Image (spheres, rainbow, N blue to C red):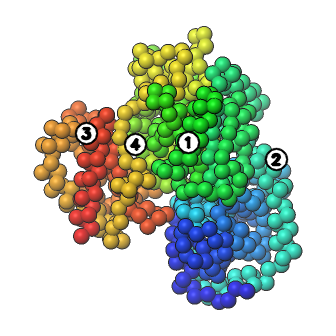
Amino acid sequence: MISFVNMDNILDNIILSASGFRGIFTENNDEESKQSKIPATKSIFAAACALAFSNYTKSLGLNGDIILARDTRPTGNAIADAIIPVLLKQGRTVRWLDVCAAPEIMSYAKSLDNQNCQDSLNTASGFIYISASHNPIGHNGLKFGLTDGGVLQELQANVLIDELKTILNSQDMVMNLENILNNIDKDLLNEVYKSAAKYKNQALRTYEDFTRKVITGFSSEQGTDDKKTNDDDDEKVMAIIRKGLNDYPLGVCADFNGSARTVSIDRDFIAGLGAGFKSINDKPGEIDHKIVPEGDSLIPCREFLESSNKNNPEFILGYMPDCDGDRGNLVIWDNKEKKARALEAQEVFALSCVAELSFIVWTGQIKYDSKGNAAVKAALAVNGATSLRVDRIAEAFGISIFRAETGEANVVSLARRLRGKGFFVRILGEGSNGGSITHPAAVRDPLNALSAIIKLLSIRSKDSKKGLYEIWCERSDQMENYREDFSLGDIIASMPVFHTTSVVSANGVLKVKSTDHSMLKNAYQGIFLKDWDERKAELYSKYGIANWDAESYNGSEERQGLKNFSESKSGGLKISFFNDKGRKIACIWMRGSKTEPLFRIMADTEGPCQGFEQDLLDWQRSMLIKADT
């Protein structure tokens, strides 16, 4: 039985943002705990979230089914136990998928949109996904979305948050939720749980078909409504990939780390492309190490790839997803070093950009005139913390680049706005976490990043038609390095050279006392201007820095030439540095996390000198520490 809870404690440890609602959910309040039981406050919180989302969708005139799923965290089922009774009481049909990857539930929701679904009675209003993404195992939370293929955008999420707070501030509403949870109809609840296999199979079929269309690049959202033509084009691309992998075989290793991807399409899909596949930690909930797919978490995958390559040199790629499976970073076999190594998140995203931009040149979706100018208005949409290396890639392809505040919803919103202005946006994402989103998907997906690299390796030049890597070499003026029997190492070596602070680096995290980020940035501005005057001669002499500009990122809005740093508020603030020819060569960036109690900082520098990045990062840290005092 749930007894009345102190409403003041319900939001303890919970962060509410467009990226989702997250916090520690274990009863012992230990973020590394594998407990499955949650306290009464968290049950009430989950129930209130269910009611808020039901009310929100009804306010939009959406009264269809609600899709519900979870990642593999131990507290997921307890949260579902609090959500389902409330939705049933609201008269909603609940499509319970049990364990499901985030991109899987979102593609399933998209397939049940009124416009996409042929059966008008078989539609959904949206989804609730139980997950804390890459946070530690004792955390959990909720993501919400409608049927557009992604999570709620910031303005939508803010409406939902206001509705949630209204519910939690009403003692009568909280007591009503307690009553619902204390008087659960076990038979109805069991019926929902028994339906999981049916809906899970539907979701898997939908997700596989959608992923195939995303990777082959001929969705009706990209220029044609002729489904037969799209299917024919899709199969032609798949056949070329399979032929390429038959001629140049490769194998893929996965460290699933017990994530939701253990029961998704990965094995069958990658094998269907014609690649080999092996996995470890491949049982749901078999969480063997830290969840965040960066740094030391990639060591097991690296070691697995090394042993696999020793037995079969075709195995040259590996990946590890986070718990909900919407993020995943890569390890590669380095032929030169004769060992496996993890790619930095920024490298993964940059490779995906090279692959997908080369791909749309190969498909003819972007053409160039006799002077090499793109005949189509195209763009990349990224977050403020994405390395300048993607600026160099965009420049090579003659396309524009736009930035939003960190947060998947912000970047997706920016891309949608750009498309509304007539831009062709094939790929978007956040280089800071390696998360690439390939249109028409509206969520990060490691299968898309992995498949992008597989396309780079398998779609090779034939007769007079250039393959993806040759297109990249041509666009980036590196044809002298192109050879027909190129390897993954050759592709890596062709990438722009940058040094960028990792988001999981201890040097990239700063704890500050100030809770008012506007005031903190105002103080920081005074310190920066003073330091700039003192250091500008040295910075020019050592690194060629001649000038600077301040930029802010709030939601999907980007502002350059910022005069007052405090106007960036709680969003991202970047200082970009230019050489004496006006070319941007480095930057320092900061933003307070909205999903974790952390303040993140970063430096990004062009060229082989790692000391350049460290110098700027140390300077950034020292200025913020002074501003915080």
Q: Classify 303 as above or below 9.
A: above
Q: Nearer the viewer, residue 622 or 49?
A: 622
Counting residues from the N terminus, which is met first, the one under dot 4 or under dot 2?
2
Give the residue type that dot 4 points to: Ser
Q: CA distance from mark 1 to mark 3?
A: 41 Å
Point out the tag, 1 or 2, that comes first from the N-terminus. 2
Where disc 2 sits, the SS reads: loop
**Residue assigned mark 3:** 578
Mark 2 vs mark 3, CA separation in Å: 54 Å
Numbered disc 4: secondary structure? loop
**Is residue 175 something one can see in this rendering?**
yes
Assess whether mark 2 and mark 1 are in contact (beta carbons under 8 angstroms).
Answer: no
For the point 15% across and 48% down, the residue is: 535
Q: Which mark is residue 387?
A: 4
Point out which mark residue 303 bears.
Answer: 1
User: Which residue matches tag 2?
Assistant: 118
Count the marks: how many? 4
Residue at image location 37% in from the left, 48% down from the top:
501
User: Contact (CB < 8 A) between labels 1 and 4?
Assistant: no
Mark 2 or mark 3: name the one nearer the start of the chain.
Answer: 2
Q: Quadrant of residue 553?
A: bottom left
**How much space separates mark 3 and mark 4, taking CA atoms?**
15 Å
